[in-house]
Image (cartoon, rainbow, N blue to C red):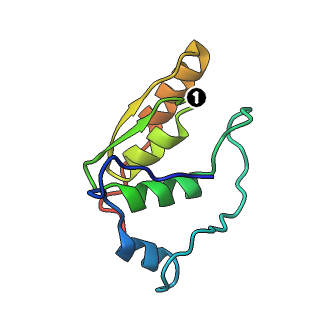
Amino acid sequence: MIWLASKTKNYFFDYGTAKGLNGGKQMKNLWEIPAEKHIMEHPTEKPKTLLERIILLVSKIGGTILDPFMVSGTTVSVAKKLARKFIGIEIDDNYFEIAKSRIGKSRQIGKPI
């Protein structure tokens, strides 16, 4: 379950990109995302495809993505790839080192769709 919350009605949601990702049709509230092989041995790892969709729809290029439970850095790596700034917080030193390595290897793909 993913919630989009805002203190005001002044939030960003890219309806044009949503339609583009959904074959030109308005995106529904149930998304089908193909399963992906886990990179890490962590029970809550999310598919990069899911994170790409969320980041594209709710942020602009140059915007900031916060991941308060960074673990291995999937979200912040995707944010970097999509030309977003990011803040990642991780309490476990081992996962933090893994995340730093992944972020360092991530490449920005230029201007995303």
Looking at the picture, tell me which residue is in the foreground, 14 or 88.
Answer: 14
Quadrant assignment, res 87? top left
Question: Which residue has dot 1 on it?
Answer: 71
Left of 33 or right of it: where is 54? left
Q: Residue at x 33, y 46 (%)?
A: 7
Q: Residue 38: horizontal and vertical position, in percent?
A: 71, 44
Left of 15 or right of it: where is 10? left
Q: Dot 1 surroundings within 10 Å: few (below 14), some, or many (20 or more)?
A: many
Q: Residue 41: horizontal and vertical position, in percent?
A: 74, 32
The amino acid pointed to by label 1 is: Val
Q: Residue 102: horizontal and vertical position, in percent?
A: 51, 34
Q: Residue at x 38, y 44 (%)?
A: 80
- Compared with 62, 33 (above or below) is below
Q: Residue at x 54, y 16 (%)?
A: 91
Looking at the picture, tell me which residue is in the foreground, 9 or 87.
Answer: 9
Q: Given the current orientation, which residue lies at the most extreme top position? A: 93
Instruction: Check the picture and name the quadrant holding the C terminus.
Output: bottom left
Q: Given the current orientation, which residue lies at the most extreme front position? A: 8
- Compared with 112, 76 (above or below) is above
> Total of numbered circles in the picture?
1
